[in-house]
Amino acid sequence: MANTPQSKKRARQAEKRYAVNKARRSRIRTHLRKVEEAIASGDQTAAQAALQAAQPEIMRGVTKGVYHKNTASRKVSRLSARVKALATA
């Protein structure tokens, strides 16, 4: 348990950051799920629109420190490849 005033404050701040990051991660996962569902349905225009909405949200997670840059880039790259494959299929 935190004893000093400084450690008590840091514990409060960590709790707030945890809540913010948790909400942001959840929002990103929701966007990712919408893209996955659109890909599964086979609707290329819906998948493209969902990806367009998800991409800035994922990258915002990078700038806010929720995801690593390479992780976000990998996710976006793989999703866009799958959406692009819908056009040929």
Image: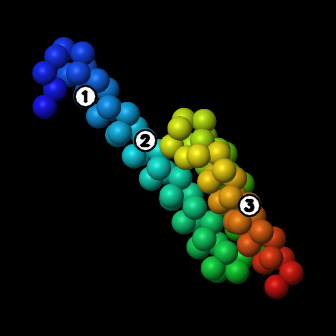
Quadrant of residue 44 within the rendered picture = bottom right
The numbered mark, 2 or 3, whose residue comes first in the sequence reads 2
Q: Which mark is residue 30?
A: none
Q: Amino acid at mark 1?
A: Ala
- For the point 41% across and 45% down, the residue is 23
Task: Name the side, left or right, on which 16 lies relative to 28.
Answer: left
Task: Name the side, left or right, on which 3 lies relative to 10.
Answer: left
Along the line of sight, the residue nearer the viewer: 13 or 84: 13
Q: Secondary structure at mark 3?
A: helix
In the rendered image, which residue does mark 3 sit on? 77
- For the point 62% across and 54% down, the residue is 71
Asked if 12 appears above or below 33 in the picture, the reply is above
Q: Secondary structure at mark 1?
A: helix
Q: CA distance from mark 1 to mark 2?
A: 15 Å
**Tag count in the figure?**
3
Percent of width and height locating residue 15:
29, 34
Disc 1 crowd rating (10 Å Cα; few below 14, some 14-19, many 20+) is some
| Quadrant the N terminus occupies | top left
The numbered mark, 1 or 2, whose residue comes first in the sequence reads 1
Quadrant of residue 51 within the rendered picture = bottom right
Q: Secondary structure at mark 2?
A: helix
> In this orientation, does residue 53 appear?
no
In the rendered image, which residue does mark 2 sit on? 21
Q: CA distance from mark 2 to mark 3?
A: 23 Å
- For the point 54% across and 35% down, the residue is 64
Asked if 12 appears above or below 67 in the picture, the reply is above
Asked if 3 appears above or below 56 in the picture, the reply is above
Q: Amino acid at mark 2?
A: Asn
Percent of width and height locating residue 26:
44, 53
